[in-house]
C-alpha cells in the first residue's frame, strides 16, 4: 500500500495546496491518470473542484479524471494509475462513495498497490470509520464505516486550541468521548501542515508533531520525521 | 407545546447551569416529576449526570427521574410532568432515543403539552434532524431524523469566532454547506447564553441576538427579546 494522508490542503494565508506540493509531487509524478473524487464538495462545486485539481496535478503532467461525471466511475477508476480524494464534508463524501459503488471498489485496488492521496475528509475515509471527523453531518450516510486502509482513526485539522470564552467541547474532549465508546481503537491527532506517508506496513510522519490518543493512557506525542509501523507501534530496533 | 430550548447549560467561568436558572425555574416549578434523559453523556457518566440535575431541579421541589435506569422508560415518561434532555453528544443521544423507544413516544406527549426542556444536544433533537449539531459522530445512529417539534434547525453554541491561524471551516461555512443540501430548511444560530421559549405557535428569544440562515438570503439577525412565530415569521402587527 502507498498512502499519502494529509491533515489539510492549505494553511491559512498560503496559496492553495502550497504546503503539500513538495510531498505530493514525488508521490504522483509518473502516474499518468489520476482519478479525482470531488464528492466531499457540495454538488454545485464539484466541477470547479476537479478543475482546480486538474490545474495543479497538470503541472506534473498528470491527467485528472473527475469521477463525479463518469457513468461508470468504478470502471474508470480501474483505468487510472492513482486515486486522490479531496477534502470537504466527510458525510457528503461517504454517502457518494457508497452510492457510486466506489466504497466497495476502492479498498482492494488500494490494498493491491494503487497510490492513494487524501486530505482532510479524504484522510477520514481512509480510516476504519469517519467517526473522528470534525464535519457537520449535513446528510445521512448509509454507514459511518469507511475504507479501513489503516488500523487507527485520524482526526484531521487537529488542534488543542479552543475559542476563548466559548463553552463547546475541545478537540481532546471529543476524542476522549470517542475513545469511551471505542476503547480499542487509537486516534491520531494530525495537525494542519502534517501528513502520514504509508509505505507497505510502515509510515513516516511529515510536517509537525502528532498526538496518539488511546483509552486509559496519557496522549503520546510523536515527533515529526518519526517512522513507525502502520499499527502505530515503534519500528523494531535494528540489530 | 411548551418548549425551552437552550443553546448551552453553562457559560465558561460560571457555576453549572447558572445562566439558565432564572428561566428554567418558572418553567419547571409546579412540575412534580421531571423525566431526565442523560443519553447524550457516555454510559459511564450517566448516573452522575442524573445526580447533578437531581440536585439542581430538587431546589425547586421537583423530583428527577433518570430514564436511563428504567426498564420501561416510555411508561415511566408517561407518569412524569415534564421532560428534560441534557446536552453532550447528539449522536449518542439520538441512538439511545431510538433504542429505548423514546423517540417515538416523546413527540406526541410533547405536542400534547408535556413541557420540554433541552440544552445543546437536547435542543438539537427537538429539530427535524440533528444535521446542524457541532458534535463528533462517535457512534452510528439509525437515523439523523429527530423529534421535529419545531420547523427549523438549531445550531447550538453558535459563534462566528474561529481559532486564529487554523484552517478548518467556520460555523457559518458549515451552515452554508447544510443549506446547499437542504435549501428549504432555515437554520438558527443560537449563541451560548441564549434560549428559545416556545409557547404554542409563538416563541421568544431570550439572552443574546441570534442569526437566521436561509439559502439564497443574507443572514438575518434577530434581537434578544423578540417574539416571533414558530415558523420564524414575524408576529402579525397588532391592529
Image (tube, coloured by chain):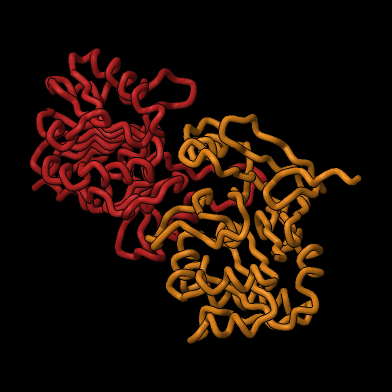
Chain colours: A orange, B red
Q: Is residue B113 left or right of residue B60?
A: left
Of residue B132 and residue B192, the one placed in the foreground of this image is B132
Image coordinates for residue B41, horizontal then vertical, percent: 38, 33
> Which percent across, then down, holds residue A226?
80, 46
Which of B219/A53 is in front? A53
Residue A11 place in picture, x, y as percent? 70, 54
Q: Position of residue B208 (x, y in %)?
A: 37, 35
Residue at 19%, 18% in the rendered image: B63
Q: Is residue A151 above or below residue B58?
A: below
In this picture, is A48 found above or below A174? below
Q: Residue at x 81, y 69 (%)?
A: A26
Image quarter of residue A64:
bottom right
Q: Nearer the viewer, residue B179 or A72?
A: A72
Instruction: Indicate whether A238 appears above or below A38.
Output: above
Quarter of the rendering occupied by the N terminus of chain B: top left
- Residue B206 seen by the camera: no
Query: A146 left or right of A196?
Result: left
Residue at horizontal 16%, vertical 30%?
A: B82
Amino acid at each position: 500500500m502507498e498512502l499519502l494522508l494529509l491533515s489539510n490542503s492549505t494553511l491559512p494565508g498560503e496559496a492553495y495546496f502550497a504546503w503539500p506540493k513538495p510531498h505530493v509531487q514525488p508521490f504522483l509524478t509518473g502516474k499518468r491518470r489520476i482519478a479525482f473524487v470531488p464528492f466531499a464538495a457540495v454538488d454545485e462545486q464539484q466541477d470547479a473542484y476537479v478543475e482546480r485539481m486538474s490545474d495543479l496535478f497538470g503541472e506534473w503532467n498528470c491527467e485528472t479524471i473527475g469521477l463525479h461525471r463518469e457513468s461508470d466511475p468504478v470502471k474508470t477508476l480501474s483505468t487510472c494509475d492513482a486515486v486522490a480524494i479531496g477534502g470537504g464534508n466527510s458525510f457528503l463524501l461517504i454517502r457518494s462513495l457508497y452510492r457510486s459503488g466506489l466504497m466497495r471498489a476502492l479498498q482492494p485496488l488500494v490494498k493491491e498497490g494503487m497510490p492513494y492521496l487524501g486530505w482532510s475528509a479524504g484522510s477520514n475515509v481512509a480510516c476504519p470509520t469517519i467517526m473522528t471527523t470534525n464535519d457537520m453531518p449535513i446528510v445521512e450516510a448509509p454507514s459511518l464505516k469507511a475504507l479501513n486502509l489503516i488500523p487507527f482513526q485520524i482526526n484531521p485539522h487537529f488542534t488543542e486550541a479552543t475559542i476563548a470564552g466559548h463553552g463547546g467541547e475541545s478537540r481532546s474532549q471529543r476524542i476522549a468521548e470517542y475513545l469511551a465508546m471505542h476503547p480499542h481503537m487509537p486516534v491520531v491527532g494530525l495537525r494542519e501542515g502534517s501528513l502520514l506517508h504509508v509505505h507497505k506496513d510502515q509510515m513516516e510522519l511529515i510536517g509537525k508533531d502528532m498526538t496518539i490518543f488511546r483509552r486509559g493512557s496519557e496522549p503520546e506525542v510523536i515527533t515529526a520525521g518519526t517512522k513507525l509501523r502502520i499499527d502505530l507501534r515503534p519500528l523494531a530496533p535494528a540489530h
